Amino acid sequence: MDSNLRFWKSEGKTFSQRFFHWIDILDPLLLFKSQEEIKTSRELLLTSGPDITKSLLNKKIKEAWNLSLASVNPSTGDIVPPIFRLPAFLPLTVPLVLGTSLLPNGVKHAFLGQLLFHTYITSFNLAHGNTTRKPEEFPHKQMLLTTGAIVYSASTGAFPHYILTRFQLQSPAQLFLKKIIPAPLTAFLCAFNVLIIRGEEYESGIEIMDSNGCIVGVSKKAGEKAVKETAFSRAVMIGTALFIPDIALHYLKRTNILIRNPLVCSPLKFIMMVSVLGVMIPVSFSWMPQLGTIQRSLIEPEIISSTEETEFFYNRGV
């Protein structure tokens, strides 16, 4: 079992535990650490002892845990590129989400905003997925799925802009397309993206482990559970970040004339989105355990026939 998964097995039993750990892991300063520092931290963790809770009392070891958890994919042991590491998610996602929520002049601008957003989300999903097989074993399929998911999501996300521009709709249709549709549509597309990009996990399965961390087999059922949980949490995170600022500003504009000024409205929307996403990112990451569990009754018969374990563990991914 990878060191990161050992950490979550010990320290990820409750939502509150996971939430406060994620607050530390999402520290943007961790993005400035080099690969050498990350490797050194991983080596330090191998000598930190079996009691992870006790090791966290040591400041140096705690920093090593945070750096490892923020920078390494536990399913492969690979160091994630800086822009796709977990602490980069908030500072990079906020302007991209803001770009998709604004109504630019023209469908082309709307499509470009959606394209940039879904390209980043797709790359993030690839970097933090849990694949048993290496990508080079199915390069053409993965490339096709990745390109298709990005183009479909960007096109669908820009479709309300096309309707507004093409038919010059007025209220209440305009309100519906500008304020109501974007949040659930973007949430759906984010969930769809996870399901497509990480489809290999439920098609081929992911590794499951016993209570000792030993791999007992590759399960499609566990892969399906992991991907669905991640897709749902991603949809809630992005949907909430879009829905709350839009609805709040809609009602504020009706009661305060000053907020109708774009010079006031745009910065206020940015602040609200940063605040909501700043809360929802650790909440969504903490919602379900990083080290997921699946009961024996849900596992394929060919796997459980070789063990007496009643509960199995798997890396859910992010």
Image (cartoon, rainbow, N blue to C red):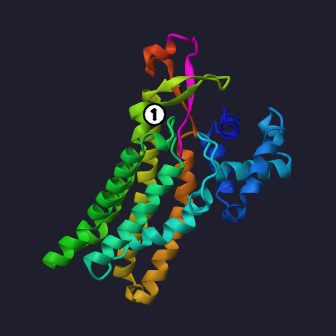
| Label 1 SS | helix
90, 301: nearer the viewer: 301
Q: Is residue 89 magenta?
A: no
Image vertical order of residue 181 relative to residue 224, above or below: below
- Whether residue 181 appears in this view of the structure is no
Give above or below for 208 relative to 182. Answer: above
Residue to which mark 1 is pinned: 223
State the residue lying farthest toward the left: 167
Rendered residue at 18%/71% (across/down)? 163
- Would you say the magenta stretch is mainly helix, strand or loop? loop
Local crowd size for mark 1, using a 10 Å CA cut-off: few (<14), some (14–19), many (≥20): many
On the image, the x and y values in percent for residue 41 come to: 78, 49
Q: Which residues are magenta?
A: 305-318
Q: Residue at x 52, y 75 (%)?
A: 271
Where is residue 71 shown, x and y percent of the image? Answer: 65, 53
The quadrant in which residue 47 appears is top right
Report whether 305 appears left or right of 12. Answer: left
- Which residue: 42% across, 31% down? 204
In the foreground, 223 or 182? 223
Q: Could one spot residue 157 in this view of the protein?
A: yes
Q: Is residue 40 left or right of residue 289?
A: right
Label 1 is placed on what type of residue? Gly
Question: Where does the N terminus fall, quadrant-wise?
Answer: top right
Q: Is residue 194 left or right of residue 55?
A: left
Quadrant location of residue 48?
top right
Give coordinates of residue 179: x percent, y percent: 31, 69
Number of on-image labels: 1
Q: In this rendered view, identify the residue nearer to me: 249 or 120.
A: 120
Q: Position of residue 306 (x, y in %)?
A: 54, 11
